[in-house]
Image (tube, rainbow, N blue to C red):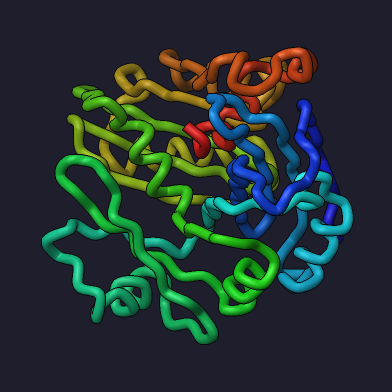
Amino acid sequence: MVEKKISIYGELEAQSPFNSDQLLLEISNTHMALLVKMAGKDQVAALEIFTFNSNETDWYDIFYQVRTHSVVLDRSYNDTRVFYNLNEAVIVPLEKFNTNSADVYLETIHGESINQVIKFDHVNIIPQVVNVYRIKKELNEMVNANLMMVTPRHTFSKTVEHIFREGKSYFSAFIKVQVYYHQFLVVLVNNNKLQLVQSYDYQTPEDILYYLLNIVQQFNLSVDYTDLDISGFVLTRSNLYDYIQKVFPKVTFDKISDEFLLKENLEEYPPHFFSPFLNLAV
């Protein structure tokens, strides 16, 4: 079952075969986010978020139902950026990367798999790394069948680049947490070194706190000296935020300018709510 959770629309121009707006999609096993970035403007004019369970619904049906209920996909786009937010990814130092061994990296960490397409991104940070990932053939076929002029990347790649944007440095432990429906993404940087990028499934707020504490313990960190940056579907009046605040004394929210998404449509949401998606368009 596919459910449309959120829909925010600005003034979308009429459909045209020469439409120069940019379409951005983020696809995970539990959600699909669609954004329209207006041509010539640093502004997102539409945002739709659909939820589903890809273990229960095949990708053909997911795309069919999203297309049926999407206003964004009523238009055509000559520039489409697809970000795969999928668990089966491995970050490899550039000097260790070999295209012929991409499948070996994935099988070593995530095990063998069939009917998968292997892709990789060069991540623009110093030192440079490569993000190797795989997606189901069915998903790859649905993306290419339903969308035009597709440029694929992985959410991990874009998020890591955003963290290190403009040469930003981290000389203490820094954990970025992006919370979605039933899934969250964690990036750990310590002493200015990228140490972890991973996505986890969760059912309860306690699950997220458990994973974070496990990461702190695994990397021998101190919660008192760890900066925790949160974005996504976390309300400040929620059990999850209460749990996190009691354990981590240094908590901030990743906020994006109100002008980037029409602020008159955002009054019912906190500023950090859509940052994981809007940062894909920055």
Q: Is residue 93 above or below residue 244?
A: below
Quarter in which the N terminus is drawn: bottom right
Residue 227: quadrant of the picture: top left
Number of dots carrying numbers: 0
Quick check: 41 left or right of 104? right
Quick check: 192 left or right of 254? left
Residue 189: quadrant of the picture: top left
Residue 132: quadrant of the picture: bottom left
Residue depicted at x 35% and y 69%: 109
Residue depicted at x 72% and y 70%: 59
Residue depicted at x 18% and y 30%: 191
Q: Estimate the x, y position of residue 204 in percent, counting from the top left.
A: 69, 41
Return the residue nearer the eye: 50 or 183.
50
Return the residue nearer the eye: 73 or 89.
73
Residue depicted at x 42% and y 74%: 118
Q: Estimate the x, y position of residue 75 in percent, counting from the top left.
A: 76, 50
Considering every residue shown, the one lying at the far bottom of the view is 114
Q: Estimate the x, y position of residue 173 in percent, counting from the top left.
A: 28, 27
